[in-house]
Image: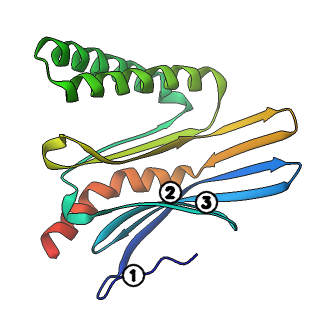
Amino acid sequence: MELKLANNEQIVKTYTYSTRSIKSNAGKENVNNNLIITNKRIINESVSKKTVIRKEIPVEAADYVYTVFATQGITLLVAIIAAVAGVLSLIIGVTTDMTILTVLGIVMLVIAVAAVIKFFLSKGAGVMVEISGKMGEHSLMQMGTSSLTKSVRLHKLKIKVDKSVSEAMVNEIGALLLDLKRKY
């Protein structure tokens, strides 16, 4: 299914940041994970021959971008940073009765646990992008993945993160969105 653009909408940048390959009795299915930035929308999509899943937000709604790109070598550092940020957010959120900080703290602790598990189990890369609204108050879009190969019974899942595309995405997305918000 082809992405339809609105009047005067143009694709500014497309990042195919990871691919998934799923093998089972029914055959093999390949899924591409893309982040598409147009002059009007931010679109995160997963596309295969049979399925398209998209989440879209308007560019003007994006006020805060949080990104992480990690290779095996720094995954443990990401875990430590996420754990410290999670604990601090959780403490501040609980003591000041700020639900958003409490939830953010829990999310960061989950990310820390996932990073530690990834550190011991994989040799690939990981990427995460979170786009939030006004002053980071609420998350509008979250996406992320890490390299993985897993076999369960007759099914095999393989996720490959394109390191160069993911790193470029993490390095460029903030400036790209800022330029788009100023331009349009």
Judge whether 131 appears above or below 54 on screen. Answer: above
Residue pointed to by mark 1: 5
- Residue 89 place in picture, x, y as percent: 23, 20
Give the Cα distance between marks 1 and 2.
Answer: 23 Å
Which residue is depicted at the point 23% across and 16% down? 88
Q: Amino acid at mark 3?
A: Asn
Judging by the rendered image, the residue that carries numbered circle 2 is 165
Q: Is residue 68 left or right of residue 86?
A: right
Q: Are marks 3 and 2 in contact (CB under 8 Å)?
A: no
Q: Find residue 114 and name its label.
A: none
Asked if residue 134 lies left or right of residue 4, the reply is: left
Marks 3/2: CA distance?
Answer: 13 Å
Q: What is the secondary structure assignment of the residue under circle 1?
A: loop
Name the residue at 88% across, 38% down. Answer: 154
Q: Earlier in the sequence, mark 3 or mark 1?
A: 1
**Sequence order check, earlier mark of 3 and 2:** 3
Q: How far apart are labels 3 and 1 at the CA level? A: 20 Å
Q: Which kind of residue does numbered mark 2 sit on? A: Val
Q: Quadrant of residue 13?
A: bottom left
The picture places residue 50, in percent across and down from the top left corner, at 69, 66
User: Residue 93 is drawn in which quadrant?
Assistant: top left
